[in-house]
Image (cartoon, rainbow, N blue to C red):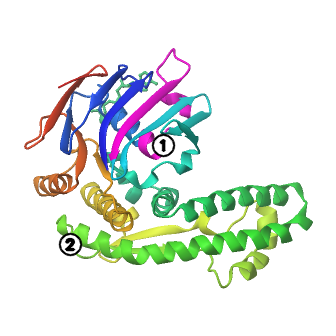
Amino acid sequence: MLLRSLYTLNYRNLHNQTLEFGPGLNAIVGKNGQGKTNLLEAVYLALTGLSEAGKLEQLVQHQQQEGFVRATLERDEGPSIFEVGVGKGRRVAKVDGIRVKAGEMLRGAAVWIRPEDNDLVLGSPSVRRGYLDQLLGKLSVRYAAVMALYDRNLAQRNASLRSGEHWALEVWDTQLCDLGSEMLTMRRRVLLRLQELAQAAHEALGGGNSLELTLQETTTPESYLFDLKNRRSEEIARGNTVIGPHRDDLELKLHGVAAQTFASRGEARTVALALRQAEFELLAEKNDEMPLLLIDDFSAELDLERRVHLLELAHRAPQALVTGTESFPRALLTYQVEGGMFRR
Ligand SMILES: Nc1ncnc2c1ncn2[C@@H]1O[C@H](COP(=O)(O)OP(=O)(O)OP(=O)(O)O)[C@@H](O)[C@H]1O
Ligand SMILES: [Mg+2]
């Protein structure tokens, strides 16, 4: 898969323009606050339908009502056009002119590496859970669908806990266990390979061979229903479901201790990079097409060894978009960006 071009309209600070990209390393160079991150975010949205913005309307240029991104792709089966329009609480996705759900876009088409990934290591369990859920959603349409059902069920169950309609809990419990157990099983399965790939990447990055990934589970597929019954009175008191995949953590250990508590910033960055590289390789294994690699702020907090490694990864990918404040060696194409305007 190759990203041929991207058109943006009323998207953040970006000028309305079409940018063309080639295979290999595409560099985007500019000073702080010029639109480098916004461009990668727009590409990621156009391909995957995913956005990390707190609210969709944040993506729309100030003073405008709607924004739009359109990616032209070259795929094995021929050219294809992916479009996403965003407005207040609204996201409309189309593939080759036909309306699709955001979940039906190419979730696994891109991997985005950025400085904020440090939160994967140093942040709360919810960030790591988000990483795991998003990765599984990229690997399996089934997982994404099951998780959406689980979340809906969970919200309804919590509403019953709070409203005192405890007679409804039996129904929610059974569904929650079925859906939650499927998520746990899929998480356990993917973790085996993720662990191998992340360890290898971590070692190659010069971080040593002591990285361990373990699931901290609040329940198991076997004991789920039983555990729920046991915690019933606590849950009613709290008005919340206290066990299940929405409460689990992906624990990261370095030298046998929790990286969240003990890792230095540089160590955290290395672990985060290893997780992203593992994501890239898992997707490449699962899908026949290699994902597009997006690397934001390439040199942030990295020493020379890690920078060289990351550049090698970018060169190994069939196509990478890499941003930085200075030019890159061996870039096949370079855009300079100033005030949201891109020039080659
Ligand atoms: N909805 C929006 N409308 C207009 N401008 C916006 C919107 N959202 C963000 N911006 C602006 O876009 C500018 C560029 O942001 P961006 O994060 O892409 O910069 P950057 O080039 O990645 O900078 P840095 O090197 O500091 O990471 C910022 O000044 C920001 O205020
Ligand atoms: Mg940026």
Q: Is residue 203 above or below residue 51?
A: below
Q: In this view, does 241 lie above or below 116?
A: below
- Name the amino acid, label 1: Glu
Report which quarter residue 66 is drawn in. Answer: top right
> Which residue is drawn at the image coordinates 31% and 64% (left, top)?
281
For the residues labelled 1 and 2, the Cα–Cα distance comes to 31 Å
Q: Residues within 10 Å of mark 1 (few under 14, many from 20)?
A: few
Q: In this view, does 64 lie above or below 35?
A: above
Query: Of 225 and 331, which appears nearest the observer?
Result: 331
The residue lying furthest to the left in this view is 329
> Which residue is drawn at the image coordinates 20% and 72% (left, top)?
208
**Picture disc at residue 52:** 1
> Which residue is drawn at the image coordinates 67% and 69% (left, top)?
179
Counting from the top left corner in percent of width and height, residue 288 is at 34, 63
Q: Can residue 71 be seen in this view?
A: yes
Would you say 110 lies left or right of 242 here? left
Q: Can residue 214 be seen in this view?
A: no
Counting from the top left corner in percent of width and height, residue 41 is at 39, 38
Q: In this view, does 219 lie above or below 306?
A: below
Mark 1 vs 2, N-terminal side: 1
> Which residue is drawn at the image coordinates 51% and 35% (left, top)?
97
Counting from the top left corner in percent of width and height, residue 246 is at 61, 63
**Residue that carries the numbered disc 2 in the rendered image:** 208
Count the numbered circles shown: 2
Residue 92 magenta: no
- Name the amino acid, label 2: Gly
Magenta residue span: 45-74
